[in-house]
């Protein structure tokens, strides 16, 4: 059964007169909300999603980020910028994440470029601008590109071209909170990485001392037709290793 037949075979959603139960207000969805909703519904139904949840130690990276921002007042490095760079590096190590299923479902297209989509919450709805050739950008250039694209998305909007051609997407709730979630894959990508709020956790140190570590929860949703659970765990571990090293700030 193809996708359209499957959807057509489902019973309709129940309709209700909500005013029967109390006062209501009806608002039209924005154009962006309508389009995003259609794409997300399609992706959720058509792609067998699995989500891998883990935490990575970002204690050292956060200290370096604070030092960087203090020494470089003109360019503010955010955790999102660090994740964008770390994602590009992980894609290079695990190319099955930098891929898409061909339209016929019989082959996989491996991409040789590293373009990262970054979800932006705008007044009209969710948009995902794509930062191109991230592997060729320095950290400050990534930070500037993320800020510029987010500002354009919120104020002027984005063209279809500016939201096309991603290798993988990133969505962050870090400034809002949360511990884990299941982000929906941005087809034709085969994976999307979600990040929530950093937390401090006590860990056992030398001679049974307690050491506080800053941890970043990550949620990786992936297309199980292309990626298996072991690869997902390795991919997130690779991001963790990158954050634990100095390579992000090189």
Image (cartoon, rainbow, N blue to C red):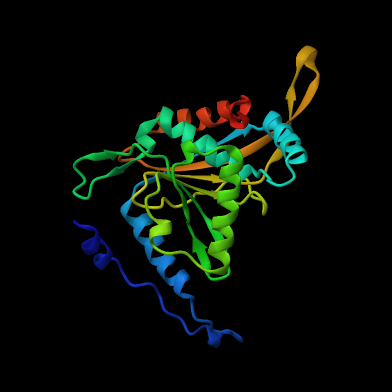
What residue is at 74 percent from the left and 32 percent from the top?
A: 63
User: Is residue 67 toward the left or the right of residue 150 in the image?
Assistant: right
Towards the viewer: 6 or 167: 167
Above-or-below relation of 204 to 87: above
What residue is at 66 percent from the left and 43 percent from the top?
A: 77
Number of on-image labels: 0
Above-or-below relation of 186 to 94: below
Q: Position of residue 129 (x, y in %)?
A: 48, 56
What residue is at 37 percent from the left and 32 percent from the top?
A: 95
Which quadrant does the N terminus fall into?
A: bottom left
Question: Which image quarter: residue 211?
Answer: top right
Q: Position of residue 138 (x, y in %)?
A: 56, 37
User: Is residue 161 toward the left or the right of residue 193 in the image?
Assistant: left
User: Is residue 167 toward the left or the right of residue 62 in the image?
Assistant: left
User: Is residue 80 toward the left or the right of residue 88 in the image?
Assistant: right
Which quadrant does the C terminus fall into?
A: top right
Towards the viewer: 69 or 245: 69
Q: Position of residue 54 (x, y in %)?
A: 56, 35
Question: Which image quarter: residue 106?
Answer: top left
The extreme top residue here reads 207
Above-or-below relation of 156 to 16: above
Q: Position of residue 156 (x, y in %)?
A: 53, 69
């Amino acid at each position: 059964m193809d996708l359209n037949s499957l959807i057509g075979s489902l019973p309709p959603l129940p309709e209700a007169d909500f005013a029967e139960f109390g006062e209501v207000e009806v608002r039209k969805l924005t154009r962006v909300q309508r389009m995003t909703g259609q794409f997300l519904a399609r992706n959720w139904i058509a792609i067998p999603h699995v989500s891998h949840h883990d935490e990575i130690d970002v204690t050292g990276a956060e200290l370096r980020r604070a030092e960087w921002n203090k020494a470089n007042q003109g360019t503010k490095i955010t955790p999102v910028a660090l994740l964008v760079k770390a994602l590009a590096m992980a894609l290079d190590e695990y190319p099955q994440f930098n891929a898409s299923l061909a339209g016929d479902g019989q082959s996989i297209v491996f991409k040789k470029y590293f373009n990262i989509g970054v979800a932006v919450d705008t007044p009209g709805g969710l948009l995902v601008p794509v930062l191109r050739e991230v592997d060729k950008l320095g950290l400050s250039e990534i930070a500037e590109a993320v800020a510029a694209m987010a500002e354009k998305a919120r104020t002027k909007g984005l063209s279809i071209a500016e939201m096309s051609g991603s290798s993988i997407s990133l969505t962050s709730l870090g400034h809002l909170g949360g511990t884990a979630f299941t982000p929906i894959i941005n087809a034709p990508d085969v994976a999307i990485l979600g990040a929530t709020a950093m937390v401090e956790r006590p860990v056992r140190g030398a001679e049974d001392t307690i050491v506080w570590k800053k941890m970043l929860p990550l949620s990786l949703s992936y297309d199980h037709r292309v990626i298996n659970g072991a690869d997902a765990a390795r991919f997130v571990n690779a991001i963790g290793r990158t954050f634990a090293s100095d390579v992000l700030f090189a």
